Amino acid sequence: MTIQATWKPSQGNSICQLTNGTAEWQADLDASAGGDTRYPNPHDLLDSALAACTTLTLQLYAKRKGYPVTDVHVSVGHQEANGTYTMQREVKVSGDLSPQILEDLLRVANRCPVHKTLSGQFSIETSMA
């Protein structure tokens, strides 16, 4: 699936429209660059991909294993320094869970597809259409 992003000066703002062909969402600049804080900035979108993937992966795994999970909460923030983008992820899983189950869930969180992608090597190929 390909993500399409569009923006037109006639909109009168900096909000870009995003779609994957079925879902639609929006993003904007950081507030410091004049963006509207009601919309995620690109770094928010990147961080949210990891948070969402972790949450959904844990949800599926807990259901499959029959773990008595009552709540999954994942928060992701980041810091940028010296050319390194460091994501800080905190996973909280609630329920009547033993230390062994929590350890298993942490192992699975570290194997969610977006985590694996972000932990790998990136290559971006750009062309002008």
Image: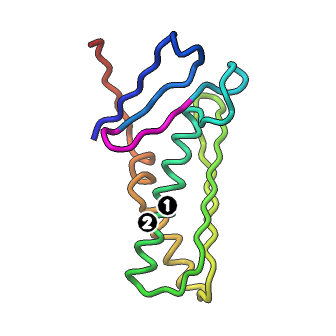
- Give the spatial CA distance, label 1 vs label 2: 5 Å
| Residue 34 figure quarter | top right
Between residues 88 and 35, which one lies in front from this camera angle? 35
**Which percent across, then down, holds residue 65?**
41, 84
Whether residue 94 is situated above or below residue 128 in the rendered picture = below
Q: Position of residue 68 (x, y in %)?
A: 53, 87
In which quadrant is the C terminus drawn?
Answer: top left
Mark 1: which secondary structure?
Answer: helix
Q: Badge 1 local density, few (<14 within 10 Å), some, or many (20+)?
A: many
Determine whether, in the image, residue 6 is placed left or right of residue 44: left
For disc 2, the marked residue is: 57
Quick check: marks 1 and 2 in contact, CB under 8 Å?
Answer: yes
Question: 115 and 48: which one is in front?
Answer: 48
Q: Residue at x 54, y 48 (%)?
A: 48
- Is residue 21 a member of the stretch shown in magenta? yes
Would you say 112 lies left or right of 86 here?
left
Vertical side of 129 occupied by 123: above or below: below
Residue 120 shows which numbered tag?
A: none
Assign the N terminus to one quadrant of the image. Answer: top left
